[in-house]
Amino acid sequence: MAKKRGDRRDGKLLRNIDSMHYIMPLMYPNRCDNEAFVAERVDLTNINRYLEKKNADAPEYKYNLFQVIVAAFLKTITLRPKMNYFIANYNMYERNEVSAAFTIKKIFTDDGEEDLAFIHSKPEYNIDSIHSEIYRQVSSVRKDNNKDSSTQSMDKIMSMPLFLKKMIGRVARSLERRGKMPQSIIETDPYQSSIVLANLGSIRLKAVYHHLTNWGTTSLMCTIGERKNRWFKNEDGSEELKDSVDLGIVLDERIADGYYYAKSIKLLLHILDNPELLEKPFSEAVEF
């Protein structure tokens, strides 16, 4: 589709929205002032069974819980397009692609460097695509000690005089707000993605609330907590101890209404409870 006046490089301007969603960015322009937080606990029984099957042939890089959660979010966003909307410079846009970003800790020490991973999803992708892409990016960072392009740009700015840093900051914020930042600088910026995920369970933390940012275009954030055995109530009223993980989801409440969000979260949880759905293309509809 040809780019129209008002469209950005990363998104299409939404021209036919209701008056309330048109006015909200004008009245509440800051993303961080419009956050809604959702806490969910996921029973991992079916995911564990699924991962056992996927790893039965002992692949070099095992399938894991994080990959399943990333894939489940990407499928949910693909099927629920309003979850991929973003607000910038007082306007609402539909992102041109579905994407996910997360941080990679190179070495688990206090001084260990972090790098950025960015997944550009496609409608035909499935869990195997995400498994391969995460393996490629994690291996590249940890084995070759490579740095992503956004980190390289930040390293260069660090060496500049303070007055120049401040000037660059002002110019960068103006360019970013209008979608004019050079792609080479922000191509791995996590806050230019559909969703940012933080795997806090890998460092034994809970799924906490994590704010969105006014910089960038990301309307969704998810923290993944440490997996633990927790009590679940069955339909007959009995209680059972099950392996589980908590998710902390923060979203920009301006891009859709509460009903749309609730149904999207319901779809996400349905996919996590039926991970075999991730074997099919993300664009394939799900009955739930």
Image: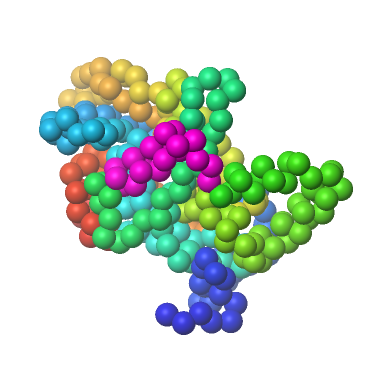
Q: Is residue 227 above or below residue 183?
A: above
Name the side, left or right, on which 164 lies relative to 30: right
Front-most of residues 277 and 140: 140
Q: Quadrant of residue 40?
A: top left
**Could you tell whether 241 is left or right of 10 in the image?**
left
The residue sitting at 54% across, 34% down in the picture is 114
Indicate the position of residue 278 as horizontal and vertical percent values: 23, 48
The N terminus: image quadrant: bottom left
Task: Indicate whether 26 appears above or below 14.
Answer: above
Q: Residue at x 57, y 71 (%)?
A: 8
In the image: residue 209, left or right of residue 144 = right
Tell me which colouring the rendered structure shows: rainbow
When the figure is inspected, residue 180 is found, relative to residue 240, above or below; the finding is below
Q: Residue at x 22, y 23 (%)?
A: 237
Q: Is residue 223 visible?
A: no
Q: Judge left or right: residue 117 versus residue 19.
A: left
Residue at point 73%, 61% (across, down): 174
On the image, the x and y values in percent for residue 187 come to: 53, 55
Q: Position of residue 81 (x, y in %)?
A: 40, 62
Q: Is 34 in front, or is 236?
A: 34
Q: What are the residue bounds of the magenta stretch?
A: 130-148
Q: Would you say residue 30 sits in the magenta stretch?
A: no
